[in-house]
Amino acid sequence: MRIFVLLTLAVLCVSTLAGSPAMTLTSPGFSNGGTMPKTSTCDGGDRSPALNWTNVPQGARSLVLVCHDPDAPGGEWTHWILMDIPAGEKGIAENGALKRTTTGQNSWKKPTYGGPCPPPGKSHRYIFTLYALDTWLLMAQTSTRTDVEKRIQGHILGKAELVGKYGR
């Protein structure tokens, strides 16, 4: 009898979560699959784009934002990592900062945003991924995307992606 009650409760919890609206990630500067603004690239000042998100799952304690280029000539290239964003935040302004966040190390080995800078004649995709977590990461600025992806396993409550493109 106890097992039946526990299984019933588990099914109810899963179906409640499945009925929740999906977390979204958008930008006022570009649409999903659209061209990123030049100001957010190496050709226009390397200003991080404004981003907004909605429907962060209940129970989330923090958010992590990762931007990477899967089309880079030498393999995937990390442009930006923001960790420990308070779950109550709704977005970040262009070139903005959020209190209590930590910026991880990008592929240039710097804890900053580095804008798209594909080789001439090439267009690349830049994938912004927002994770809602049930914990705080409390990781150092030297943390890489690989470090973050390992640490968040088992803590992800929701995920949203936004893809921008840029070519030169």
Image: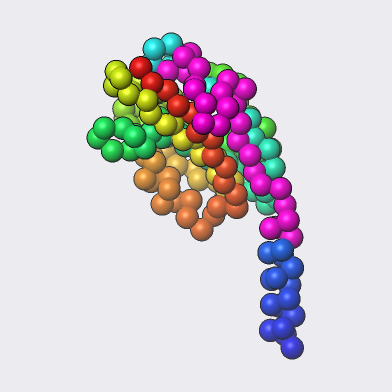
User: Which sits in the foreground, 94 or 71?
Assistant: 71
Residue 30 located within the stretch drawn in magenta: yes
| Number of marks present in the image shown | 0
> Is residue 57 placed above or below 164 in the rendered structure?
below
Q: Quadrant of the C terminus?
A: top left
Residue at 54% across, 35% down: 162
**Residue 83 visible within the image:** no
Q: Magenta segment range?
A: 16-41
| Left or right side of 54 for 119 | left
Residue 84 located within the stretch drawn in magenta: no
> Is residue 4 placed above or below 80 in the rendered structure?
below
**Residue 64 visible within the image:** yes
Residue at 61% across, 31% down: 26
- Percent from the top left, x then y, of residue 37? 50, 17
Residue at 60% across, 52% down: 157
| Left or right side of 134 for 2 | right
Based on the displayed image, in which of its 4 quarters is residue 41 positioned?
top left
